[in-house]
Image (cartoon, rainbow, N blue to C red):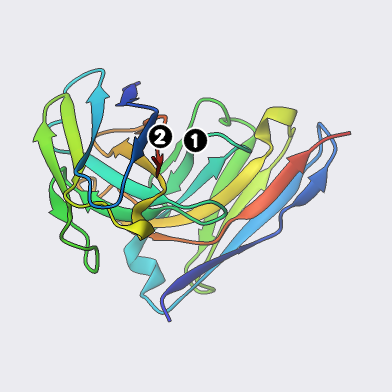
Amino acid sequence: DIQMTQSPSTLSASVGDRVTITCRASQSISSWLAWYQQKPGKAPKLLIYKASSLESGVPSRFSGSGSGTEFTLTISSLQPDDFATYYCQQSNSYPLTFGGGTKVDIK
Amino acid sequence: EVQLVESGGGLVKPGGSLRLSCAASGFTFSSYRLNWVRQAPGRGLEWVSSISSSSGHIYYADSVRGRLTISRDNAKNSLYLQMNSLRAEDTAVYYCARSGDSIWSLYFDLWGRGTLVTVSS
C-alpha cells in the first residue's frame, strides 16, 4: 500500500499569510494526487486534482505542485474561510490512501 | 441539484449488520464510479470501497474485505453498503463520494453529507 505523510499536522497562521502544506508518498505516484479541505461537521471538498489542476469554483489563491513522491499545497494569502483541515490523497492505485491531515488554525 | 444523500446509519451492536444507502440526483449516475469513505470520530479520512459504473470492478480496503459489500442500482440511481460482522472500530461517519470511472480519475469530486454508524453494546 502507498503511505501518505503530511506535514505539519497543525499550522497556526494569520489572515494574509502564505501557507504551504507538504505531502509525501512512500513510492512514486507520478502526478496522481488530490487535495481536499474539510471544515468541522462537513464533508470534504475537492480543491486540487492531478497535483496541480484547480477544481472548478475553487479560488485561485489555492495551488498545488509536485510530482513523484513530494507534493505541496499552497494558499497564497490565507482568508478567514480557509481555516480548516486539509488532506492529500493518492489517486494512483488501490487501495486509495489519504494523508493524516493538516489543521490550519488561527495564530 | 447535483447531490448525494446517505441514509441508513445508526446504533448497532458488535457483530450486527446495517445497510447504508446513497441516493444520487442531478447527474448521470451510471457514468460514474462510486465510493464509500469513512471518518472515525476525531480522526482522518479512510477509503473503504469503490464500484465502477457497471459494477464490473469492485475494490475494498483490507480492513473491511469480507465483512462489507458495496453494490449499486443504476436504474434507481442508488449506491449501497451492506455491513456485516460490525466491530467497534467501524464506528465512523460514512460518506458516499463520486469519482470519474476512468482509472485516471480516482479522486472524489462530489461528496454526500455522511451518515453516522455507531457500533457499541
Q: Position of residue B27 (x, y in %)?
A: 37, 76
**Quadrant of the frame with the C terminus of chain A:** top left
Can residue B70 be spotted in the picture? Answer: yes
Can residue A95 be spotted in the picture? Answer: no
Instruction: Name the amino acid, label 1.
Output: Gly
Residue corresponding to mark 2? A101
Relative to B62, is A77 on the left or the right?
left
Q: Position of residue A48 (x, y in %)?
A: 22, 51
Q: Residue furthest right?
A: B121
Give the chain of mark 2.
Answer: A
Whether residues under marks 2 and 1 lie with C-beta atoms below 8 angstroms apart, the answer is yes
Q: Residue at x 24, y 63 (%)?
A: A58
Q: Of B109 and A18, which appears nearest the observer?
A: A18
- Quick check: B28 above or below B103? below
Relative to A59, is A36 on the left or the right?
right
Instruction: Name the amino acid, label 2.
Output: Gly
Q: Of B33 and B114, which appears nearest the observer?
A: B114
For the residues marked 2 and 1, what is the alpha-carbon distance in whole angstroms? 6 Å
Residue corresponding to mark 1? B44
Q: Position of residue A2 (x, y in %)?
A: 31, 22
Q: Residues within 10 Å of mark 2 (few under 14, many from 20)?
A: many
Quarter of image, res B34: bottom left
Q: Position of residue B16 (x, y in %)?
A: 81, 38
